[in-house]
Every structure is written in structure tokens, then in C-alpha cells.
Image (cartoon, rainbow, N blue to C red):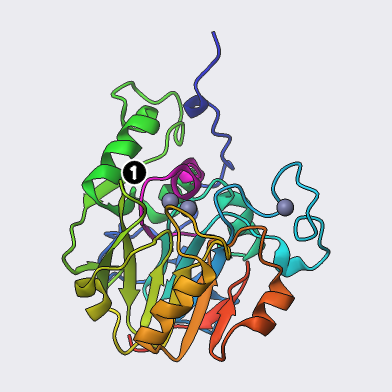
Amino acid sequence: MTKPASSSADLPSNASSGRAKTTPAPGDRRPATDADQADRSADSSRPEVVFLGTGTSVGVPAIGCDCPVCRSSDPKNKRTRCAIVFRLPDGDLLVDTPPDLRTQLLREDIGLIHAIMFTHEHADHLFGLDDVRLFPFRLHAPVPIYCQQQVDERIRKSFDYAFSDRVETHPGSKPRLELRRITHDRFEALGVPVTPIPMLHGPHFEVLGFRIGDFAYCTDTNGIPDASMELLQGLDTLVIGALRYKPHPTHFTVDQAIEVSSELSPKRTLLTHIGHDLDHGPTNESLPPGIELAYDGLRVPLVGL
Ligand SMILES: [Zn+2]
Ligand SMILES: [Zn+2]
Ligand SMILES: [Zn+2]
């Protein structure tokens, strides 16, 4: 019989030793550990937001596609699946765990994630969750995951091995996850207030955007109710999903995203969840002032904390 994926963790032998002896409470303010210090040493730019991925669900290039964008040599046309990291004073808060998570964190030299929050449970935002398996060794605790009920249920179904009662064969044989239910109410993560932004994602899905300080991340939506628009006033940076020019049943088009941006008037608007219809350079030239396509690896300052 094939062994389940949960038995295949191959962790470095020193992963659980040689670190600070403190037992932090993830999600709360806590003293920095040696691991944190090591992770932050190359980074004096906190607080900031790092774009891990900016592509639509199949990524760009799409497998087997010969279109000019998928064949482009412009690195900004290489888009992995969507996620960002808030690099906060007390640690790194990841939004979504796309299938590309491992390569994204390696690429950005982010060695530790202290907490995760989910926009919704679609596969392109969730199925890299197993990649967080290493972090509890350095946190000395499970990774706290902030999510709504429907995401919680999807995680328990799709990653059932992480919640099994079976005795672990070896440390790290399954991811240690601590699900913390959120609603539409404000909550605190890593010592920072987070405002959920309820949004529509086609006819069947309600998703969350998140606002921290004057930065809001609103991917995978094609409708923002008035009450949520109120929560997006006075932004420095609005990140909003914009799949392509042609209409789509569950995502904003470029023009619809521009419309939302002009209603909210943030200082800067960055479009994400981008498909292969949009060529980075030419599209950017055609966008109104203050609106740009995001790209993988983009870092922006986080203000208003
Ligand atoms: Zn998506
Ligand atoms: Zn293509
Ligand atoms: Zn989605």
C-alpha cells in the first residue's frame, strides 16, 4: 500500500534543537527568539508586504500554452499562485498557502512563518499548506491559522492526516496546525489588528480580504458590498484582483478593478491574480496613474500600523 504523504517528512536533524528555549504563544505578542533574529537579520525594512505570487489559479506561464505572455522572457510575466506575507514587527503573517509556497519562500529568503490567515479555500490558495510542516520546530508550537468556518472545514477534510489521532511515527510526520476561527469581526494576529473585508467571489463564494494598517489585500473577488467599501477608506495601498480584460464570472476585470480603485482613491493600487492575457510592460503603460500590476517578489512598505 502506498504510504500517505504524512509519513514522508525528512527534517534536518538539528531542526528541533539549538533554538531558543522559550515557548512563544503564536498569535500573541511575545519575545523574539534566536530563530526570529536569524530570520530577520537580512531585513531592516519591516514592516513591509512581500508578494509571493500574483498569478491566477493555473499560474503564468500556463502549462502547455504558447501565447506570447506564457512564452515571454520578461520575469514579471512569470506569475506563481497568489499569496503575500505581512512582515510585521512581531513576525511574519502569511496570507494563503498556494501550491507554490515552498519555492516562493525560498525565493524570497523567508525562513519562518509565524501565523497564517486564509482568504478562502480554493485549491490555488490552500493546497501548499503542508509546506508549513517545518515551522513548529522553530516556533515550539503549532502554526496558528486564522480562517472562517468553511475554510476550517475544507482544511480538516483535505488535510485529514494532520488531525488524525494516530501516534506520530517521527517528529514532523504530520503538520501541526492550530485552527482559529474568525468571523467578519476584527481580530488580532501577531499583535496587530486585522480587519476582515467580506467580498463576493462569484455566485457561490464569500471570501475575505484583509486590511492591516493602511494596506488592504482583496484578491479573488468580483463584488465588494457597500459595508466592505467603507472598511477600505483612506488606504495607502489597495491590492485588488484583476484577472484579464474579458468578463469572468468570479473575478474582476481590469476595468472593474480600476472602477473600484477610483471609488476608493488609495494612494497606490496594485492588481493581482493576473492571467496570461496581461503582458506586464504594455499593460502597465496602459493603466491610469497610481495603478500598476503587482509581480512576484514585489515588496511594498506597510504604513499606518
Ligand atoms: Zn484564486
Ligand atoms: Zn498563455
Ligand atoms: Zn478563488
Task: Locate residue 156: give its quadrant.
Answer: top left
Q: Is residue 91 above or below residue 249?
A: below
Q: Residue visible at 31% across and 25% down?
A: 164
Judge by depth and name the residue closer to the eye, 33 or 61: 61
Task: Locate residue 75: give its quadrant.
Answer: bottom right
Asked whether the viewer can see residue 118, the reply is no
- Position of the N terminus, as image quadrant, is top right
Asked whether the viewer can see residue 5, the reply is yes
State the extent of the magenta-drawn residues as a range. 112-131
Q: Which residue is mark 1?
A: 177
- Position of the C terminus, as image quadrant, is bottom left
Judge by depth and name the residue closer to the eye, 19 or 61: 61
Question: Residue type at mark 1?
Answer: Leu
Q: Is residue 165 above or below residue 105?
A: above
Q: Is residue 84 above or below residue 149?
A: below
Judge by depth and name the residue closer to the eye, 69 or 208: 69
